[in-house]
Image (tube, grey):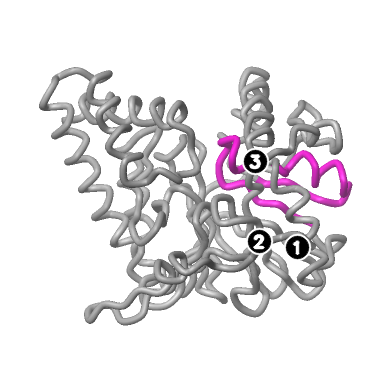
Amino acid sequence: MGFHYGLDASEKMRGFLESPAKGFVLRIRTPGKIAEGLWCLGRKEACVYLLEGKEESMLINAGTVDLIPLLLGQFREFGIDEARITRLLVLHSHYDHVGTAPFFKRRNENLTLYASARGWRILGMRTVLTAINEAGRQAATRMGMETLYSDYQVAWGEDVAGEALSDGDRLGVEPFEGVIVETPGHSICSISYYVPALKALFPSDAGGIPYGDTILASGNANFTQYEKSLQLLKNLDVDYLCADHYGYISGSEAKTYILESIEAARKRRAEFLEVYGQTKDIEEATRSLVKTFYESRPDYFLSPEILTGIFRQMVRHMVRHV
């Protein structure tokens, strides 16, 4: 079908790690079945999950707009019945997490979209929708898919709407029911989703990004709130940590991942404040942090322009809250 699902040798080495303290750690970055009733779809930089019930299925995360042809191919490849997908849960409103939602909503009139109340308020702003569509076009062009917006009905518009969820709400497909946990900080509208029957946690970027064999703390909007949100997730019993970027984690690391994310956030705050302390200049500190970041992560999925804006916002917040 033209899709490459294999791991190269370096990715295999990054996927299987071993330490005396934790035993085997398994980070999986290729699409496929995770457990009975749970699938990982998309590609490693942009993951979408499918919760497959007895009569209905639910997508978790909408990913980037360029995933549309890939997802349609994966439905066929894995024998997933698209007609059974009646729900799509958006965990926050950034462009790389909402991209396919308009397409699937227009394609299936029985599909219900879900997001937080704050998420829907943001997705109701024309300026935000314009920015999402522009970022989506740029991403599609980088992927060699310049005709995506003309080939499919993919643009966000005021016709795309859904239901609002808040902390403690329950959502799922029989026999899997999950609970919503409001976890702002990465964005003001971030929510996480936990399915006890599978011990599966979907924290989106509120749980830290599993790049390589590290965890990147991503408290973009409010780093202090981000750290508080991690505390809300740390006591959940997790066998599968399903991240929106760079795949899912099983094995012993899944159980400790949020605790490790809390430590990664502590270190990131200390690093940012140390670099700022050397210059007392937010712009200079931001440039230095971005340069250092890409020196060790040249293949990171975000562009330097986007990451610069994120780091600038994080530095400003940390300096105000010293």
Q: Kindly report the distance in space between the C-alpha atoms of the residues bearing marks 3 and 2.
A: 15 Å
At x 24% / y 31%, what residue is drawn? 318
Of residue 193 and residue 22, the one placed in the foreground of this image is 22
At x 47% / y 69%, what residue is drawn? 9
Mark linked to residue 41: 2
Closer to the N terminus: mark 1 or mark 3?
1
Q: Residues within 10 Å of mark 1 (few under 14, many from 20)?
A: some
- Secondary structure beneath dot 2 equals strand
Instruction: Left or right? Give the position of 1 relative to 116.
Output: right
Q: Residues within 10 Å of mark 2 (few under 14, many from 20)?
A: many
- Secondary structure beneath dot 1 equals helix
Mark linked to residue 74: 1
Q: Residue furthest left?
A: 278
| Residue to which mark 3 is pinned | 98
Q: Kindly report the distance in space between the C-alpha atoms of the residues bearing marks 1 and 2.
A: 7 Å
At x 76% / y 27%, what residue is drawn? 157
Identity, as a three-letter code, of the amino acid under mark 1: Gln
- Secondary structure beneath dot 3 equals helix
> Does the magenta segment cover residue 120?
no
Span highlighted in magenta in the image: 86-114
Q: Position of residue 228 (x, y in %)?
A: 31, 47
Q: Nearer the viewer, mark 3 or mark 2?
A: 2
Identity, as a three-letter code, of the amino acid under mark 3: Val
The N terminus - image quarter: bottom right
Instruction: Left or right? Give the position of 145 relative to 235.
Output: right
- Mark 1 near mark 2, Cβ–Cβ under 8 Å? yes
At x 20% / y 26%, what residue is drawn? 319
Q: Position of residue 191 (x, y in %)?
A: 51, 48
Q: Nearer the viewer, mark 1 or mark 3?
A: 1
> Does the magenta segment cover residue 93?
yes
